[in-house]
Amino acid sequence: MSTPLTLYRPGLAVGRYTQAMHRAATPEFSGWLEHTRPAGGCARPIRLTGTIAAVDAGTGRITSRLHTDELPDRTLYKACGNRRESHCPDCAWVYQGDAYQLVRCGLTGGKGVPASVGRHPVVFATFTAPSFGAVHHRHVPRHTCRSRQRCDCRPAPCRARSNAGTCKHGQPAACFARHDADDPRLGRPLCLDCYDHDHQVVWNYFSGELWRRTKQAIERHLAALCRKRGIPLVRVLTSSGKVRWVPPVRVSHGKVAEMQCRAAVHFHCLLRLDGVDPDDPDVLVPPPAGITVDDLEEAVHAAARQITVTTPRHPDRPEGWVVAWGEQVDVRRINSAGGELTDGKVAAYLAKYATKATEATGHQFTRFTPATIDDYADPEGDHLARLIDACWHLGRPTGTDTASGAATGDDRQDSLDTKLSAYAGLRRWAHMLGFGGHFLTKARRYSVTFRLLRDTRATYRRTEDDEPADTITVGTLTYSGSGWLTEGDALLANTAARQRRESRRIGREELAHEAWRTGAAA
């Protein structure tokens, strides 16, 4: 029997604990708790209404049918699946776990990735944006702490310049403060008028194209080394039956974008060197013996120095902007002798930033519209307000065809110049300060996919619920709303989810301890 649907109006002075007690006192509470289990812990679950049918996979016959009116609350709850920790910590926790497995499998194998990838040369590279103006920063010249997460080392002065004076706008060009890690001034320009906000949002917007060309340059550099060292090309038969001669090495990557305090993105990239199997190009094989991790490291530095992108012309800047990497390009080896970076640490580091967005800037925004943009954009405002204004201003309709833009003689550059309204996307991504890419991307051959991990988890849940393997569940559902019906429901569902998670964690630890004890005893 379904429970009558009761909505608590905001005007009623009913606390969430009173609402929770009211729900827990109903006879159907146990059924409701089990019903909300798939969305338990979610901050704003999706509520769906409609029909759920069980279909026999062999005959296609409908064996049972259930309408959501027969369920508790007359609705079906589904977790929102938001990856951002600031929006939904529980769904972000699940996403972070999937991201960890995705990155880790590309380093050690597993879940369909051969374990032999653990012997492939791998580097961890960090590409940063160039300077667009002096900002407040925190630098620790020498760490003496045991853990960087709890670092209490004394930082150096921000910008100690005894003869710096002032800028042309009359602002001090030096800062002698030793900023704390949570100082709100970090990332803010010393002079807002000197800072090039237009260039920064354009850099954020075209950083994906810069990365694409950089990876191509890395592979070209390695291919040239193969030719120089006499390593022959590999003959590959494509699916269409054509024969291609390809370089014997290729680079597979996993990449995470991180937003800095100054609101410029930088990329953390895992670059793995693979070989090419002539019989099956999709198989992951080690690179030729003549190419080492030293060559991969050299290729990354060479590409970072050489590659630039000249953006299409804009009415505010007819020659376009030059998009290039900053001077700080850090390349480290994974699992090297005496090194601090291990596959587990790197995977956890990247997975953590896969659930972030613009939180590092101190603010987070939803997508702007013409009705709301004036509340956030201000050409005379603070740092973020000027960046948002730059996105909205540069992304305005100009009525001109950018195909008449700068001609560089580069086919790849021409592909940018032939796009109409090449800057129009800046308005769409103004809430991300110009960056429109995904925060976690990978090469097709690097590792498993999120879809595989989610399908595996769904299959496990069906098995756990004793659902017949030859039965397919078909839902004809429509969206009816988001969020729990009351704050009391959210409290009960989220508490139950935390208890289940803690119970599973303790169980895993007990099993690991038992396995260790048994192995030690043997």
Image (cartoon, helix red, strand yellow):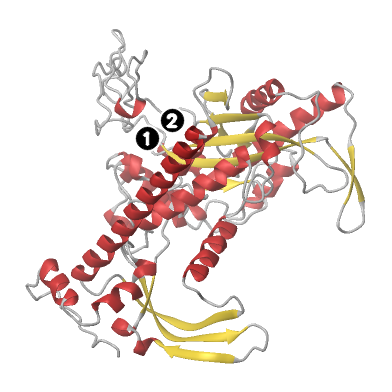
In front of the other: 3 or 519? 519
User: Which three-letter amino acid code belongs to the residue tagged 1?
Assistant: Arg
Helix, strand or loop for disc 1 = loop
The residue labelled by disc 2 is 132
In front of the other: 391 or 363? 363
Q: Whole-percent x and y of residue 93? A: 39, 52
In front of the other: 376 or 441? 441
Q: CA distance from mark 2 to mark 1?
A: 10 Å
In this view, which residue lies farthest toward the top? 162
Q: Is residue 102 left or right of residue 216?
A: left
Q: Whole-percent x and y of residue 202? A: 50, 42
Residue depicted at x 42% and y 48% = 508
Helix, strand or loop for disc 2 = loop
Check if mark 2's residue and mark 1's residue have beta carbons within 8 Å.
Answer: yes
Residue depicted at x 28% and y 63% = 496
Q: Tell us which disc is closer to us: 2 or 1.
A: 1
Q: Whole-percent x and y of residue 6? A: 20, 83
Badge 1: residue crowd in 10 Å (few <14, some 14–19, many ≥20): many
- The quarter in which the N terminus is drawn is bottom left
Callout count: 2
In this view, which residue lies farthest toward the front? 522
Residue depicted at x 36% and y 29% = 194
Residue 49 placement: quadrant: bottom left
Badge 2: residue crowd in 10 Å (few <14, some 14–19, many ≥20): some
Of callouts 2 and 1, the N-terminal one? 2
User: Which three-letter amino acid code belongs to the residue tagged 2?
Assistant: Phe
Query: Can see residue 365?
Result: no
Q: Is residue 176 above or below residue 449?
A: above
Q: Whole-percent x and y of residue 71? A: 34, 85
The residue labelled by disc 1 is 262
